[in-house]
Image (cartoon, rainbow, N blue to C red):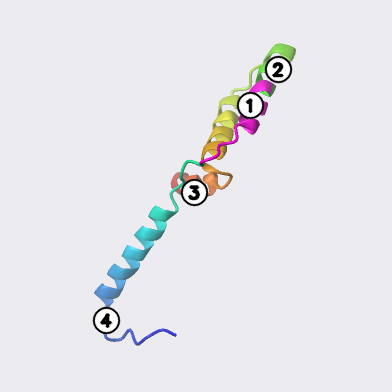
């Protein structure tokens, strides 16, 4: 049950909400995982190498794909949910 907030002025309430928002955003910052699994990065890197050897090609997007796999491996699969908030 929520108490009576009428005793607080708008400025006090806004400051409290801003403080809570800042705390929530800080807690949401991705942290390095304790047990990093490099399997998907290794698999992708091997696939890129094989395509370069077998097909003699290099797609400029490979760098981007590898970056994505590394970030998900290091910070977890939801890393880009957080990341995309800053680039949109």
Report which residue position mark 4 lands on. 8
Residue 73 figure quarter: top right
Q: Position of residue 27 (x, y in %)?
A: 41, 55
Inspect the magenta stretch and tell me whether residue 82 lies in it.
no
Q: Earlier in the sequence, mark 4 or mark 3?
A: 4
| Location of residue 48 with respect to 3 vertically, above or below | above
Dot 1 or dot 4: first in sequence order is 4
The residue under label 1 is: 42
Query: In the picture shown, does residue 19 fall above or below 34?
Result: below
The Cα–Cα distance between marks 3 and 1, rounded to whole angstroms, is 24 Å
Indicate which label's residue lies in the foreground, 1 or 4. 1
Q: Earlier in the sequence, mark 3 or mark 2?
A: 2
Q: In the picture, residue 53 is in which quadrant?
A: top right
Which residue is identified by label 2?
50
* Residues drawn in magenta: 34-46
Q: Which secondary structure class fits the magenta region best?
A: helix
Which one is in front, 8 or 77? 77
Task: Look at the numbered disc 4 and give the secondary structure of its residue.
Answer: loop
Q: Residue at x 60, y 25 (%)?
A: 62
Where residue 18 sits: x, y (%)? 32, 64
């Amino acid at each position: 049950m929520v108490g009576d907030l009428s005793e607080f002025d708008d400025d006090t309430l806004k400051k409290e909400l801003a403080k809570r928002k800042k705390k929530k955003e800080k807690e949401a910052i991705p942290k390095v995982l304790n047990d990093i699994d490099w399997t998907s990065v290794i698999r992708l890197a091997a696939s890129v190498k094989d395509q370069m050897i077998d097909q003699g090609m290099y797609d400029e997007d490979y760098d981007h794909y590898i970056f994505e796999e590394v970030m998900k491996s290091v910070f977890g699969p939801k890393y880009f949910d957080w990341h995309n908030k800053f680039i949109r």
